[in-house]
Amino acid sequence: MPQHKPDKEVIKSNRIKNLYWKESRTVGEIAKKLGLSSWSIYEFMRRNKIPRRSYSDANYVFYRGKPQFKLKEKLKSSEEQLKIAGIMLYWAEGTLIGSTVDFTNSNPRMVKVFLRFLREVCGVDNTRLRIYLYAYAYQDLGKLKSYWSSLTGVPVSQFTKPYVRIGNPNASGRKLLYGLVHVRYNDKRLLENIKAWIHEYISKICGEVP
């Protein structure tokens, strides 16, 4: 029986899907490899219903081969204490799923301690830090941004669009004088390192898995 050659469009679709998902290539890398424009790759993916990555996954792939943090290996006694404080704060107030380090708090001192941990122990790239502000409608967003920018050392240009809550701030009995902030750093490897440190420390002192 005569054999039918696979449709070229199907072959091309499978190749692009494998490069994009299995090999975690960026669209730019795929375009260069196939001698096409990035726009044509995007259009081909749309036409063939090849799903695209989420923003966080795309960001991780883009930066995967680039050093985005440098863990400090030899820590002084004070730095060891800072490391413990940082991982305990993150265990209590951080997001442990996904690919982004995301620490949430309204206490200025806790936010300052966690940022010192990120900078001095984890060696993060300051230009990739992001601040997400949660505030009430009656509060002055400009003043809040200025306050948190001064406290964190993160420029306002690195603040993402804030969440503004409409309604009675006293309904829950919780008053947020300075609002609430998320300190974010999009790097899955760093998140995995912090989670490993939490596991190691809790296992050491309690003999339990966190």
Image (tube, grey):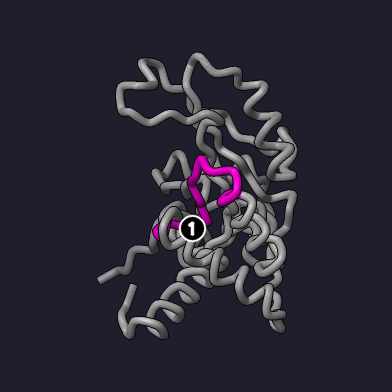
Residue at x 50% of width, y 14% of height:
138
Q: Amino acid at mark 1?
A: Ser
Position of 133 relative to 202 (above/below): above
Residue 197: x and y in percent read 50, 75
At label 1, counting other C-alpha atoms closer than 10 Å, the crowd grade (few under 14, some 14-19, many 20 or more) is some
Q: Which residue is mark 1?
A: 99
Q: Is residue 47 left or right of residue 66?
A: left
Residue at x 70% of width, y 71% of height:
70
Residue 71 figure quarter: bottom right
Residue 91: x and y in percent read 43, 62
Residue at x 51% of width, y 64% of height:
191
Query: Does any portion of residue 11 appear in the rendered image?
Result: no
Start-end of magenta stretch: 95-111
Q: Is residue 127 left or right of residue 182?
A: right
Residue at x 39% of width, y 44% of height:
49
Q: Residue furthest left?
A: 1
Q: Is residue 167 left or right of residue 71?
A: left
